[in-house]
Amino acid sequence: MSEDSSLVPIWPVLVVPTLRVLSDGRNYQRREIFDAVAERAGISDDARAETLKSGGTRYEQRMGWVLSHLGKAQWVDKPERGRYVINDAGRKALADYPNGFDYALAREVFAPFWPEKTKASSPSAAPEPSDEISDPIEVIEDAVARIEASVGEDLLDRLRNSHPDFFEQAVVDLLLKMGYGGAAQRGKRIGGSNDEGIDGLIDQDALGLDQVYIQAKRYKEGNNVGREPIQAFVGALHGFGASRGVFLTTSAFTSGAIDYAQKVQSRIILIDGSKLVDLMIAYRVGVQEKQRFSAVEVDEDYFE
């Protein structure tokens, strides 16, 4: 999720609300600050629940960035681990910037406190403000999201142009990788001229008493799956005495197909092309990890 699409304000916007919370002079715990700023800034529960792929919530990550900047600017003191209190410099900053911060002003005010290699930039290729002072973890995650979107497009194109047998096996591989079929990986492709409307089968238990049936449609973009193929799939399930199935396609589903799948008595899960490649990337089916990044932080416990 990019910063623009997040419900959580960018960290510069949270600076003044944080100073206002601290302005009563109390010695605040980190968690108390997070809760008080959320209330003062009108940040909803949904916004606070936004998570990062790396773990933790986006709100707490950005608030951590705020407290880090306030500390480096020496606008707050830390009398003990995890506790913050405003000082005279912080009160002056609150008086000097009553209208708050945007990226441009935050860069101007806080840049002197950044490490030299962060401040250094080429005059001919100056980064955008949002790239320059955003939380680095979010910058990395946004970059990874862009890479995955590009890979997803390539993956979807390859699936659409693959042999039907390959595609049917790919969706079986995906469901097995997702944990269906158990540790024994009980799943198989059935497709062929006599498949009776079923392309794959996953056994959820060793005796085959709990089964999930699969239908896979390798369609071009724009050739969306309508209600009729879903009805035919449900009919095939009934023929096998089954009540659960997964219908996957490289295109999309019409509203009629979605509505029918939601109302029919059988439990039918629809996975369109976009969701399909997202799952393949998440479970590493048809893709491989190219590079891994790790971020470090000071271990506060070590210095206790």
Image: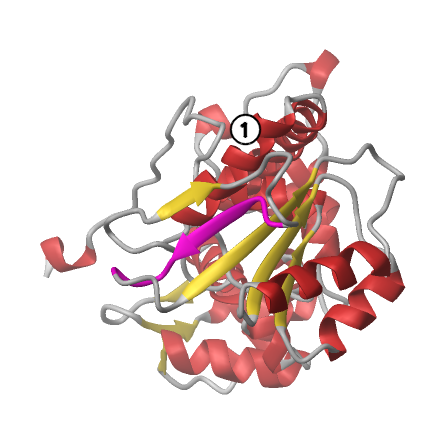
Q: Is residue 23 visible?
A: no
Along the horizontal axis of the image, is 269 left or right of 302? right
Q: Which residues are magenta?
A: 198-206
Q: Is residue 268 visible?
A: yes
Along the horizontal axis of the image, is 27 left or right of 146? left
User: Badge 1, how many Cα within 10 Å: few under 14, some, many 20+?
Assistant: few
Asked whether 66 falls inside the magenta stretch, the response is no
Q: Quadrant of residue 56?
A: bottom left
Query: For the residue labelled by badge 1, is the local secondary structure a helix, a strand or a loop?
Result: helix
Q: Which residue is mark 1?
A: 119
* Quadrant, the C terminus: bottom left
Q: Nearer the viewer, residue 112 or 284?
A: 284
Q: At 53% across and 69% down in the image, what residue appears?
A: 242
Provide residue 209's location: percent of width, then percent of height.
Answer: 35, 68
Q: Nearer the viewer, residue 127 or 97?
A: 127
Asked if residue 65 is positioned above or below residue 268 in the image, the reply reads above
Q: Amino acid at mark 1?
A: Lys
